[in-house]
Image (cartoon, helix red, strand yellow):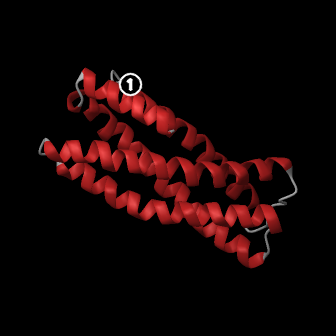
Amino acid sequence: MMFSRRTAHLLHEDHQATLVVIEALDQLLARARRKMPDTGDAAVRRTLENASGTIQDEIGTHFAFEENELFTRLEDMGDAAIGAHLREEHAALLPLGREVAQLARTALDQGFDAQSWARFRAMAGDLVERMLMHIQKEEMALLPALDELLDDDDDLELSTRYAENH
């Protein structure tokens, strides 16, 4: 999907990077099912490392930018519904993402046991499902709205600030 605003393009790139991590996490869950994965395996470690880093860093920075810079502008234009809905999803996704990131870090350090694997599997599965739907909503509703929401100067200012903080 092509966006005319640089800000939308940067957010889209973030979505694509997050999708790679989320899909790898989903594949890990599908392969392992109820059997704990071997955290000594390089592919498992890479998935857990990417999940812990990306989820913690990307989600926090990305969500804060959207809430502080974009949703407020949408509200000022009289369209509060999109921002309100996505803000609710952020409020659910952020603690879930942090929990999955922490569980992944713990598994990298200590491996999984039956209890930690069951918790990780449940939390990560929930995160995968919610994140896929959330990204789809942003791609279909929020990013296209930026074409009308931002003028050239706003787009340059926001995209520059986002890139610098990222």
Q: Is residue 96 visible?
A: yes
* In-image side of 55 versus 45 (left or right): left
> What is the x, y in percent for residue 47?
72, 50
Give the number of callouts. Answer: 1
Query: Among all residues in the image, which is located at the extreme right?
Result: 40
Residue 6 relative to residue 102: left or right: left
Q: What secondary structure is marked by label 1?
A: helix
In which quadrant will I find the N terminus?
top left
The answer to whether residue 33 shows anywhere in this view is no
Residue 29 pos. (x, y %): 68, 58
- The kind of residue on which mark 1 rests is Arg
Residue 143 to residue 115: above or below? above
Q: Residue at x 55, y 42 (%)?
A: 19
Q: Is residue 41 left or right of residue 69?
A: right
- Count residues near mark 1 (Cα–Cα under 10 Å), then give few for <14, some for 14-19, many for 20+: some
Which residue does the numbered mark 1 point to in the structure image?
6
Location of residue 132 in the rendering, given as x and y in whole percent from the top left corner: 48, 49
Q: Is residue 140 above or below residue 92?
A: above
Residue at x 21% of width, y 42% of height: 73
Q: Residue at x 30, y 43 (%)?
A: 69
Extreme residue toward the left, this view: 78
Image coordinates of residue 128 in percent, x first then y, are 55, 55
Q: Is residue 155 above or below residue 37?
A: above
Residue occupying image coordinates x 72% and y 51%: 49
The reply, left or right, for residue 57 in relation to residue 7 is right
Residue 74 placement: quadrant: top left
